[in-house]
Image (cartoon, rainbow, N blue to C red):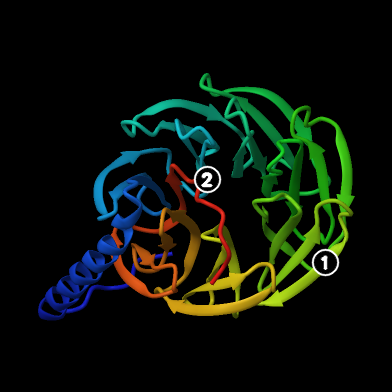
Amino acid sequence: MPVPRRHAAAGGILTLLATLVLVSAGAAAGKSSGQRYRVFVALEDAGAVAILSGPPWRLLKRTLVAAGPHNLEASPDGRYVAVTSPPSDVVTLIRTSDGKVVGKASVSGYPHDLAFTTDSRHLWVTVEQGERLVEIALPSARIVRSVRTPGRPHDLAISPSGAELWVTIDGSGTIPIYSAGSGNRRVGLSQPGGAPHDIAFTPDGRQVWLSNWSSGLLTVVSARSREPAGALEAGSETHHFAFGLGCLWASDNGGGALVKIDPRRRRMLSRTSVGSAPHHVTVAGRQVLVAVHGTGRVAVVSPAGRLLGTIAVGAGPHGIAAVPSATRSRACR
């Protein structure tokens, strides 16, 4: 997706000044925790991963990776970030301390989504066109297992306990569930219906949330019974989401907004315009960051849902992850 044409010079200067002011305001709000973060952003149209430091946020560097970097995930121990490049059939492992590439895995068949095991020793990847999952050992980036799936796997999530691996399948309302420790063994199915797209566990592991293709519908499933437990309309085309600050933060790709949701009451609390085609979301301390594909920027949002500013990162931001990514549990307000 191309980055929109820039405004005239005078307008660009005014926009830049406004952005600097907004980011400064966001930085002040983020200093209360005293924690600094590195945020990694997959630049789909630039063949690179941008690395931000903050708050206050600044662009540190861009690390070149295989063409088409798409989804991106940080390991639970914060040592690595992994990124898929579907058109290049490559998964790249980056060391978070210095942003250097330390490993590559050749994964034929369009590797799409990925999730680290809870011990940070392995990485599971959906191979969409290959209709399989692969398990990669770290830090060697060696493929140790390949598992067939009943269709084209898209996104996946590992339960907080580390026991289960849930996978969405393109064009199917059924979600196969595997043992994350021995992924060749399928341990169950969930049948929420709809057209599941992205997937994530609540921090307590009791529920699984799903977005649905070409829809604003979010579906909730009980992790224990694997039965549907509720639903919520959250925009025109909800794509991706992240839990943090006690809330669920979802990108409305079709509506150009970040939606704040109380996951316990399943109620939308706020809606923040962030720019064209927002994709993945991450929480860094007291701030929420959104990769906005259409603008080439990362939007920074406060816990109250106020836009604090944007940072230019490069062409086609898609996946995003903060290190450290853990945030304290609290009630959504």
Gap between marks 2 and 1 measured at Cα: 36 Å
Residue at 53% x, 73% y is 259
- In the rendered view, would you say 243 is above or below 37? below
Give the residue at x 52% y 51%: 328
**Element type at mark 1:** strand
Secondary structure at badge 2 equals: helix
Disc 1 crowd, CA 10 A, few/some/many (<14, 14-19, 20+)? some
Name which residue lies at 66% across and 42% down.
126
In the shown orientation, is residue 251 left or right of residue 154?
Answer: left
Residue kind at label 1, given as amino acid type: Ala
- Residue 90 appearing in the image: yes
Placement of the N terminus among the 4 image quadrants: bottom left
Q: State which tag comes first along the sequence, 2 or 1.
A: 2
- Residue 297: give x, y in percent of width and height: 33, 63
Question: Which mark lies nearer to you, 2 or 1?
Answer: 1
Q: Position of residue 264 (x, y in %)?
A: 69, 68
Q: Which of the numbered marks, if any, corresponds to residue 87?
A: 2
Which residue position holds label 1? 229
Q: Position of residue 178 (x, y in %)?
A: 81, 39
